[in-house]
Amino acid sequence: MATLRTNPYGAFNYLVSLGGTDEASVVAGFSDVSGLGSEISYSEYRNGNEPVNTVRKVANTFKNDDVTLKRGLIGSLDLFEWYKRVREGQHEPRTVTITLLDEARQPVLTFSLRNAQIKKWTGPTLAAKGGGEVAMEEIQLAHEGIEYA
C-alpha cells in the first residue's frame, strides 16, 4: 500500500484502529501518535587472527519503542477499561494499526503493531487557571514488532 511521491505526506491525517474484539467500542480520534521506532542491538566480535585490529559488529536482538497515543477526554471509558482488565491479569494483546492518509483521505501507508498491549494509562492534568487547554488522556502501548506496508 505504500505510495511513493515527490512531496512528503503531512503528519496530521491518520487513522488509529485498536483492534480487539469490539472495535466499535473505541470512540474518538487520537490527536498524537508518537514512539513508532525500533532499535537493533549489536554484539562486538573479533577473531584472534583478524588482520585488522578492530571488532566486527554482529546484529542480534532488537527492541521496540513503546507507542504513545493521546486523545481528548470525551467521557468514554474504553481505554481505561482495557488498562484495568490487563492490570487485573487478563491477557489482551491486539493488532493496532496506524494508517497515514493523503490529502484526499486515501490510505497511503500503514504501521501495524503486533501483539500490542496497554502498558500505561495517564489521565488529564486539571488546572483551574482559566486557560483553553483540552483535558487529555494518553496510553502507552508495548508491542512485539512493527510491520510497515
Image (spheres, rainbow, N blue to C red):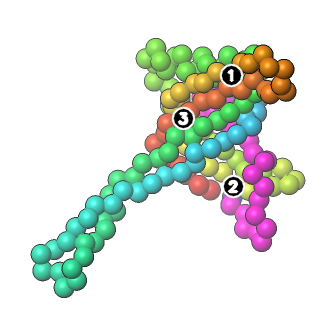
- Residue occupied by mark 2: 109
Decide: is 103 above or below 27: below
Horizontal and vertical percent position of residue 112 = 59, 46
Q: Sequence-wise, which precedes: disc 1 or disc 3?
A: 1
Q: Residue at x 75, y 23 (%)?
A: 135
The x, y position of residue 16, in whole percent, is 69, 39
Three-letter code, disc 2: Leu
Residue at 43% x, 17% y is 89
**Mark 3 = which residue?**
141
Judge whether residue 81 is colored magenta. Answer: no
Q: Residue furthest left?
A: 48
Q: Element under label 1?
A: loop
Which of 86 and 22 lies nearest the eye of the viewer? Answer: 86
Could one spot residue 12 in this view of the protein? yes
Residue type highlighted by circle 1: Thr
Most foreground residue, 61 or 109: 61
Q: Position of residue 98 (x, y in %)?
A: 66, 44
Check whether the beta carbons of the residues at disc 2 and disc 3 lie within 8 A of each other. no
- How far apart are the two marked residues, 1 and 2, measured between alpha carbons? 33 Å
* Secondary structure beneath label 2: strand
